[in-house]
Structure formats: structure tokens, C-alpha cells
Amino acid sequence: MQPEFIEVGSGSSARGIAVRRRPAALAGPGVVWLGGYRSDMMGGKAQAVDAWCASQGLACCRLDYSGHGESGGRFEDGTISRWLEESLCVFERFTAGPQILVGSSMGCWIALRMAQELAARQGPSRLAAMVLIAPAPDFTERLMWPQLNAEQKRRIETAGRLEEPSAYSSEPDVYTRALFEDGRANLVMSGDLATGCPVHIIQGRLDPDVPWRHAVELASLLARDDVTMTLVPDGDHRLSRPQDIALILRALGDLARQAPPAPEPGQ
């Protein structure tokens, strides 16, 4: 499956966003994959979700945020607002009917902000459900900033960026002042949340990046939604072992069966 490209933004902020989409063969909700920070749509979980959709005859749409994978743009220009804009554009251009958002880590923050933005447009909701894997909403403010020392914060404020060794790549993780400042404008865990759809949270008990209590707090804020939470006792942040992926696909299957009817393909 070759990527398609959509241009998002204009002028100097224009960037080409890579999308891979699988058309539906049967009636049912579509699935949209939203990856994590520095992840791309060719990762193991993303491809497993796409393969599962193929086996079920369901549509699947994946994207790389700007600065990620096959998309254009510089990674260092990325912010939550920028990646949210791209995700919404892809959602509107490439999907139809009810959709299940599957977010991983930062992708869960994007999913929750998408729900807010779509609700504000006051049209009929197309969110059928969400699967939130190792959810990291508000991670810049709640998980990262409090852990930085005075020198790291000074570097962010004066140099505009911080480079730290990555546990998942040979390249360092880069965090910019713009990412932190924009993150503060996109916080979602400051009060009650409502997605308007069922939500299944899957969290590793041994996650070194997102404490399991963060996921529990998120679940408590979604009190108006139908929320299921699965805590994986020996799970890490990736949740990419075969048994983890099987758990994710079971949750996705349960939510797909509960989703509202979708039009037949071609209608």
C-alpha cells in the first residue's frame, strides 16, 4: 500500500502529510490510527491494526504527523496544535461514517483534542469509540516539565530546545519551547472530559514514561463516558508484545461490534 499525500497549511507552514488508507469491504466503523511522539504509521502496532481491519473488511486510515515518517516538515516545528490540525484534515478528507480512533501515547492526546474540536463544530458526531494505549495527554506539562531540573528548563527557555537521549531511538529526543508553550494551550486534564463515545484505556503497570496513575486519573475525568480500563501488570510503554497487540485488537473488536451501523461500502 503506497502513501497518498495531502497538503496541510499554507505558505511557509505548508507541509505534505503522508496517509495510508484501506477502503472498507464490508459495512462497519472505520478505524483511524494516531501514533505517538516520534512514531510513524509503519510501526508494529499500527500495522497490526491495519491488518486486523483488512481481516474484518473495515476501513483503516493511518497518517504520519509532520516531521514524522514519510511526511514533510521539520520535526522541531511540531506542536500539538500543528499535529492536531493535520489529524483533523486527514479525518475529514479520508474518512466517512462512524470512526474508531486508536491513539498511542501522544496520539491519545491528539484523539481527545480531536473529540473536542469535532464536538465544537456541532455537526453529527462521527466518533464511534476510542482505544487509548498508554495515554499521554498533557505529557509536556504534567509528566515532563515537573521532572526537568533548573538547567534543563533554562536551556528550553533560552536556547528554545532540549535534547535528551532516547530510550527508543539512536537519535536524541528533541523538546522545544514551542512544544511546551503550545502544550499549555491544549491541556485536556484540567477538568471533566466527555468524548461522547465508549473509551477503552490500555495501560502498562510497568510503563516508565507514563505512570499508570496518570491513566487512572484520565479515566476518572471521563466519568460521563462508557470507560473500560485494562491495566497490564507486566506491560511497558510500548505495549507491542504479541500478547499486548492481541489485547488491543480484542478491545478494538469489541468496540467495533458495539458501534452504530455504518453505510454499506459504495453508498
Image (cartoon, rainbow, N blue to C red):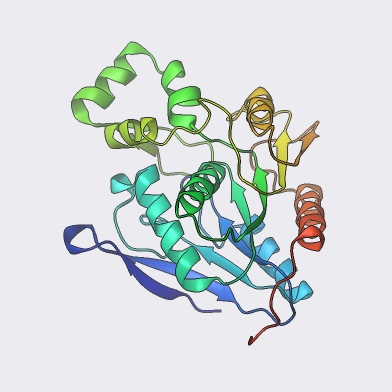
In the rendered view, tell whether residue 52 sits above or below residue 174. below
Q: Is residue 208 visible?
A: yes
- How far across and how far down the image is residue 51, in percent? 71, 69
Q: Is residue 36 visible?
A: no
In which quadrant of the rendered image does the N terminus lie? bottom right
Left or right of 15? Residue 125 is: right
- How far across and how far down the image is residue 214, in percent? 62, 26
Q: Residue at x 45, y 58 (%)?
A: 87
- How far across and how far down the image is residue 263, in percent? 69, 78
- How far across and how far down the image is residue 148, in percent? 40, 18
Viewer-side residue, 257 vs 267 = 267
Viewer-side residue, 130 vs 204 = 130
Left or right of 263? Residue 177 is: left
In which quadrant of the rendered image does the C terminus lie? bottom right
Left or right of 16? Residue 109 is: right
Q: Residue furthest top?
A: 150
Left or right of 131? Residue 35 is: left
Q: Quadrant of residue 218?
A: top right
Q: Residue at x 72, y 34 (%)?
A: 204
In the rendered view, tell whether residue 83 sits above or below residue 168. below
